[in-house]
Image (cartoon, rainbow, N blue to C red):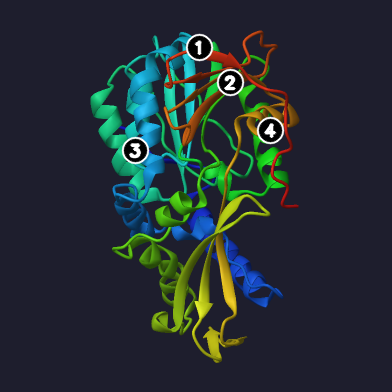
Amino acid sequence: MMETLQQASVSEVIKAAAWQFRADVFRGLRAQNKVLPCKYFYDEIGSALFEQITKLEEYYPTRTELGIMQRHAAEMAGLLGPNCLLIEYGSGSSVKTRLLLNHVLDPTGYIPIDVSGEQLRCSAHALEAEYPDIDVLPLCADFTRPLNIPGCRKPAVRRVVYFPGSTLGNFTTGEAIALLRQTASLCGSDGGLLLGIDLRKDPRVLEAAYNDRQGVTAAFNRNILVRINRELGADFDLDQFAHRAFYNASRVRIEMHLVSRRDQIVRVGSMPFFFAKGESIHTENSHKYSLPALTDLAEASGFTMERIWTDARQYFSVAYFTRGHSVKDSVHSERGGSRTFLPRLEAIPVTL
């Protein structure tokens, strides 16, 4: 029977997570420019809301990435090679993962990692039933922290981390490089990284994706306040905080904020926090990359760019990084189906 693994005992994990949540909330609300880490969106309600977002007409990233995977999963699996251990960051429902597992030759195991324990268990149980010959070892953990990867029954030839969904875009450049360097160490000298990342495009397309007409993204954004109210005894009035998402051209990113509609005092437990009218809590960034910037990112993180696949409009990309030397730094676009060598590098969007 499959067991969801923890980095420590269940009680220790719960206690540490609760302490960290409280510390991050107090630190963020005390800051001159108030901020809350976006990883706290993903409680059970937030995860369900995000699944709704991925199906919205305006939200192109999920269906575009899925289309890339459907068309190129076999080629990607060929690059991963036989007998690999597939490790997924932020696995969620693992929809795109199935496309890889259908093509990878004799994988030794699959380790989905997520902070949302209930969703992790449900998706892992489903995968275990669908792929009985693969060790499915769900790990409830924060992938931004050092990980103890469980062993599988069969030894792996190499480790490959799958990091879809453009989650890396939530990190500043310095944070992204630090995380990918940690990932390079986790993969080892023969390992690889398959990375899904959103690309730069018309700001009107970007802003529509984060301001859907049904208000699901707004509910997702405000849910972080619901969680603080529930878990930390706060008294946020949701109606007094407006969802705002916009493209910051100078930092090449979408920003999400919760904006106070009036002067007000909010208490978290016994601690008061003052909000002026128009003051915001910065809840999320989603940085957008160019193809050359991805090559820069790989090199700065100890990887080499091996291959990039995009959709015809070049809205989204899936990139394969390796630890070894590459002779094929190329991009595969569905625009005519040809490969072209990447232009010389440009700077990664800097937000230090």
Q: Is residue 53 left or right of residue 83?
A: left
Q: Above or below — where is 12 with respect to 159?
A: below
3D distance between C-alphas at marks 3 and 2? 24 Å
Q: Nearer the viewer, mark 3 or mark 2?
A: 3
Q: Element under label 1? A: helix
Q: Above or below — where is 28 with respect to 40?
A: below
Q: Earlier in the sequence, mark 1 or mark 2?
A: 1
Residue assigned mark 2: 192
Residue assigned mark 1: 79
Neighbor class of circle 1 (other Cα within 10 Å; few <14, some 14-19, many 20+) is: some
Residue assigned mark 4: 297
Residue assigned mark 3: 63
Where residue 221 sits in the image (x, y, percent)?
44, 65
Where residue 189 sits in the image (x, y, percent)?
68, 17
Give whichever of 213, 189 is nearer the camera.
213
Q: Element under label 2? A: strand
Q: Is residue 243 left or right of residue 47?
A: right
Image marks 3 and 1: residues in contact by CB distance under 8 Å: no
Q: Nearer the viewer, mark 4 or mark 1?
A: 4
Q: Element under label 4? A: helix
Tell me which corner region of the image, top left, top right, bottom left or bottom right, holds residue 21: bottom right
Neighbor class of circle 3 (other Cα within 10 Å; few <14, some 14-19, many 20+) is: some
Q: Earlier in the sequence, mark 4 or mark 1?
A: 1
Neighbor class of circle 4 (other Cα within 10 Å; few <14, some 14-19, many 20+) is: many
Residue drawn 63% across the image and 54% down it:
249
Number of numbered discs: 4
Q: Earlier in the sequence, mark 3 or mark 2?
A: 3
Q: Element under label 3? A: helix
3D distance between C-alphas at marks 1 and 2? 9 Å
Give the amino acid at mark 1.
Answer: Leu
Residue drawn 49% across the image and 31% down it:
317
